[in-house]
Image: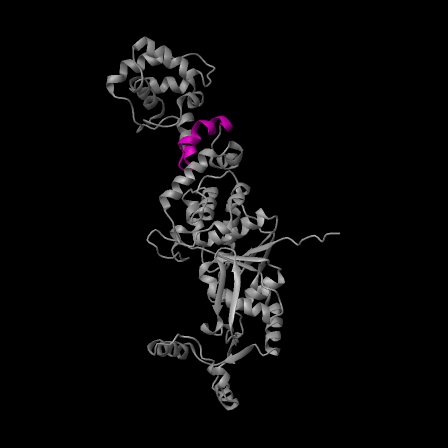
Amino acid sequence: MTATRAPDVLRFAPSPTGRLHLGNARTLLLNALTARKRGGRFVLRLDDTDRARVREEYAEAIREDLAWLGLAPDVEVRQSDRDALYQAAFARLQAAGRVYPAYETEEELDRARRLARASGRPPVYDRAALRLTDAKRAAYLAEGRAPHWRFRLSDGRIGWDDGVRGRQEIDLGSLSDPVVRRDDGSFLYVFTSVVDDVDLQVTEVVRGEDHVANTAVQIDMFTALGAAPPAFAHHNLLTAADGAGLSKREGSLSLGALRERGVEALAVAAYVALIGSAEAVRPIADLDALAALVDLKRLSRAPARIDEDDLQALSARTLHGLDHAAVSSRLLALGVGGGAAFWEAVRGNLARLDEALDWWRIATAPLPATAERPSGDDASFLAEALRALPPEPWDETTWKSWTAALGAATGRKGRALFAPLRLALTGWPHGPELAKLLPFIGRKRAAERLTPRG
């Protein structure tokens, strides 16, 4: 009897110290969509151990961003709830002699790094704490210095088969022993992440290429804790248009800011998941369709630059392809009626969904006094158009029959026929097909708009 394979488990582990930006969303989507594609589980883990910077409003904003993108984690955990787990793992490393106390201040460490660079040496921690005498340690404690704790890296090289970058190897001797516990007793990400990945049975970690060195360290930690490491894949990073890295401090590319500007969630998802890959960035119908396109092995190694104009254009194209069922609740919340027929009439002319309300008002409410009107040269033509208005009921054939009769009566055709009618009926020189919009305007409003203003 064949054993059932355990499902893949992937996770997104943001720190609630700011709003998620498009770079964070790339990591989020590559994990969530890979889990979806494989029929696996997706974990949201809030890395909230940085007590000075974590804010609850950011944790809630992360949940809102995931919901906006249509992503529902199978599990949510917070590192602030898991201290007992970290204490137990830390005790195991202590017993195995893999962590040691160090007493240097940040100023002393910074000075040592500067001296190393000045001497042409890499700024790697020299393990001075391991050479302290008992008397020196006692003296530090007497003056009130609490130790921070470092993980002692193994000797030699660490290698892994990266899901994006192929075979990777790093000499652990080129890295500093990482701090795993602060002098206030709180634990750092490099350690807690490993403990959580073991506990949550994470099978693959997909994250930015800026974490490659961390991966070598953490694989060594997995081994020290007696656990098999997950697979790792390090994706290329997104940068701003000028090539600079993205930051939570720059709010213009945060998911919240994009949402407020009316950018479609599906467009954001498609953009950040597909840019910088062998797949062309394109509108997608839903997240399942996007998951089918995501392939970590087809990601580029080069950073991908964000073009906000391209994202806005993709958002409009995405909107044009959505059927009424996908937007009906949002339209009702805006106050837009007319059902599927009205949506079909206007969607191709929208850059943002809220513009549908503008067209609903144009179709169903009096035009403002400031609305553009045809020139006086068209007055006689509009009078003829008013006389030729067909009786109701109106449907999508009304426009064609009305304008055909009007063209025959006046000799007008093309722009000379259609442009004055559009301007009189909508107040705009361009917009949705009037064949579809005219039934919503209705005969009474059309007659009022064709009548010369007093």
Residue 144 position within the rendered picture, expressed as x and y whole percent measured from the top left: 48, 83
Viewer-closest of 212 and 51:
212
Residue at horizontal 45 percent and vertical 37 percent from the top? 318
Q: Is residue 348 magenta?
A: yes
Residue 52 position within the rendered picture, expressed as x and y whole percent measured from the top left: 47, 67
Q: Is residue 61 above or below residue 338?
A: below
Colour pattern: one colour
Asked if residue 193 can be seen in this view, the reply is yes
Q: Which quadrant would residue 446 be assigned to in this image? A: top left
Residue at horizontal 46 percent and vertical 39 percent from the top? 283
Viewer-closest of 222 and 287:
222
Viewer-closest of 284 and 68:
284
Residue 450 position within the rendered picture, expressed as x and y whole percent measured from the top left: 34, 18
Residue at horizontal 43 percent and vertical 75 percent from the top? 124
Residue at horizontal 44 percent and vertical 16 percent from the top? 397
Query: Which residue ends up furthest to the bottom in the rendered image?
Result: 135
Q: Magenta-highlighted stretch: main secondary structure?
A: helix
Q: Is residue 429 magenta?
A: no
Q: Is residue 366 above or below residue 91?
A: above
Task: Specify start and end residues of the magenta stretch as a single range.
Answer: 338-357
Query: Which residue ends up furthest to the right in the rendered image?
Result: 1
Q: Which quadrant would residue 117 be assigned to in this image? A: bottom left
Residue 268 position within the rendered picture, expressed as x and y whole percent measured from the top left: 45, 45
In-image side of 262 versus 72 (left or right) = left
Q: Quadrant of the C terminus?
A: top left
